């Protein structure tokens, strides 16, 4: 274990108490901070992070530590910054030597850092969590040879989409942008558009679908009139055309799409990358977000069941067609060859490489199944509670990060946060066992 490294303090800190003299050094978060190889993360992310020109560089340990704390304890960017100012253990975990009374950065720096790092670099956090698990004895390296793979949906932070709401919202956003840029419109349809939306909702609730469709046609007509009016006003003005290009494209797609059409659709104007995914659940037939592949260890290790890989899969691919990319990614992340991989029946007809043909087992498979493999196949459902904890406790239930790269980053960070939460619990158990042995009566120790 490398000695902990601290940033150098100035002369004004000579009469202040160091954090390691104030806090409890047996705290699980302190033990975790001393176990993490921060030098490895600095090699992956860079020694410092520069947010913008003229701004002081921020240490990588500070930004990576905040990202770990955010997804470990299911906190937003604002809350984790507030708690960082109040909690000395958070500051020690992020590399501070003395207690700080002011944030050394702006909250938006966390967003900029995530976007700058991207999915490939953020995987170093998940890789380091697995390394710490093996280093502390929470997991054996051999546990990574047999894994379970399953898919779930990472919902986006959007309201439930309906055609009426999308049509009215597209018109409102176009009118707002036109007013901001000084483009005068013949009519904004603000009052009648809102009334038509209320009518549609009431008629649909009363199952009066003919009247509801009539109100829906009104909303589509209002949006079409606004689109054509704006197109006429900004014609031959390159600056205005560029400003309206993205929103006009989305509005035209919303106006043209029909219920039940095949292919990609717009379900949210502020998040057009959202996909409609049906998982066959009775309580939730459709979910709006992105499909995510999650791989966990087959064996329940001493420290729990760890996530070995997580990856967002845009485009809603068939589960079986994801293994060609997932298997090499798992092996590259853990640095180990997979011996056996267990999946559910949704992976039948998979496209895994040929050399994995005899190592992948799907539910209800009959051929090449020994009694030992049957026992392992009964463990396949152990991935479900892990997915539940990822969603409920580590911010995968509702993704607040914007754009497609936000989907990719949130899946990786949620998996890393889940693993670090298991490690904190494991380090607490080790501390209790150590204290129990230290203060045990002499006759018990002699026995």
Image: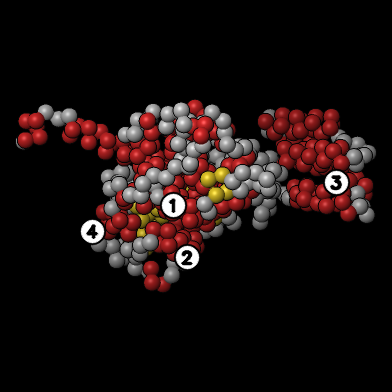
- Can you say which quadrant of the picture contains the C terminus? top left
In the image, taking residue 17 as reference, residue 411 lies left or right, namely right
Which one is in front, 144 or 319? 144
Cα separation, mark 1 vs mark 3, equals 54 Å
Instruction: Please give the name of the residue rendered at 61% of the width and 48% of the height, measured from the top-left corner.
Output: 50
Q: Which residue is mark 1?
A: 39
Cα separation, mark 2 vs mark 4, equals 28 Å
- The vertical placement of 88 against 186, above or below, is above
Cα separation, mark 3 vs mark 2, equals 44 Å
- Element at label 4: helix
x, y percent for residue 212: 75, 36
- The vertical placement of 411 against 72, above or below, is below
Q: Which residue is mark 3?
A: 227
Q: Which residue is mark 4?
A: 371
Q: Looking at the image, tell me whether mark 4 or mark 3 is earlier in sequence order.
A: 3
Which one is in front, 261 or 238? 238
Which mark lies nearer to you, 4 or 3?
3
Which mark lies nearer to you, 2 or 1?
1
Instruction: Please give the name of the residue rendered at 90% of the width and 45% of the height, measured from the top-left corner.
Output: 229
């Amino acid at each position: 274990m490398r000695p902990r490294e601290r940033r150098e303090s100035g002369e004004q800190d000579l009469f202040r108490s160091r954090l390691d003299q104030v806090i409890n050094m047996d705290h699980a978060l302190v033990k975790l901070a001393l176990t993490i190889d921060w030098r490895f993360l600095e090699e992956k992310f860079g020694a410092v992070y520069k947010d913008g020109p003229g701004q002081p560089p921020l240490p990588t340990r500070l930004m990576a530590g905040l990202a770990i704390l955010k997804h470990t304890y299911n906190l937003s960017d604002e809350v984790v910054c507030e708690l960082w100012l109040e909690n000395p253990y958070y500051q020690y975990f992020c590399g501070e030597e003395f207690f700080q009374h002011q944030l050394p950065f702006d909250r938006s720096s966390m967003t900029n850092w995530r976007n700058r790092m991207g999915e490939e670099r953020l995987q170093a956090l998940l890789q380091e969590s697995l390394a710490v698990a093996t280093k502390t004895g929470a997991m054996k390296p051999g546990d990574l040879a047999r894994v379970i793979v399953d898919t779930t949906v990472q919902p986006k932070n959007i309201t439930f989409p309906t055609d009426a709401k999308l049509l009215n919202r597209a018109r409102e956003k176009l009118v707002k942008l036109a007013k901001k840029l000084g483009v005068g419109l013949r009519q904004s349809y603000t009052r009648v558009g809102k009334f038509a939306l209320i009518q549609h909702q009431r008629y649909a609730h009363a199952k009066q679908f003919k009247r509801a469709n009539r109100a829906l046609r009104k909303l589509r007509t209002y949006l079409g009139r606004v689109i054509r009016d704006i197109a006429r006003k900004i014609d031959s003005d390159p600056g205005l055309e560029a400003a309206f290009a993205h929103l006009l494209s989305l509005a035209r797609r919303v106006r043209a799409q029909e219920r039940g059409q095949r292919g990609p659709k717009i379900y949210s104007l502020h998040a057009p990358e959202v996909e409609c995914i049906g998982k066959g659940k009775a309580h939730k037939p459709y979910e709006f977000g992105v499909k995510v592949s999650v791989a966990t260890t087959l064996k329940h290790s001493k420290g729990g069941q760890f996530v070995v890989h997580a990856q967002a899969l845009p485009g809603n691919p068939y589960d079986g067609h994801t293994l060609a990319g997932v298997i090499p990614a798992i092996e590259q992340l853990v640095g180990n060859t997979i011996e056996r991989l267990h999946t559910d029946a949704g992976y039948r007809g998979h496209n895994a490489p040929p050399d994995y043909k005899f190592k992948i087992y799907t539910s209800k498979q009959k051929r090449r199944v020994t009694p030992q493999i049957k026992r392992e196949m009964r463990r396949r459902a152990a991935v479900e509670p892990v997915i539940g904890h990822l969603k409920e406790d580590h911010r995968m239930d509702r993704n607040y990060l914007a754009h497609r790269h936000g989907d990719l980053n949130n899946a990786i960070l949620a998996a890393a946060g889940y693993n670090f939460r298991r490690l904190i619990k494991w380090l607490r158990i080790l501390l209790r066992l150590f204290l129990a042995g230290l203060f045990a009566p002499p006759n018990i120790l002699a026995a």
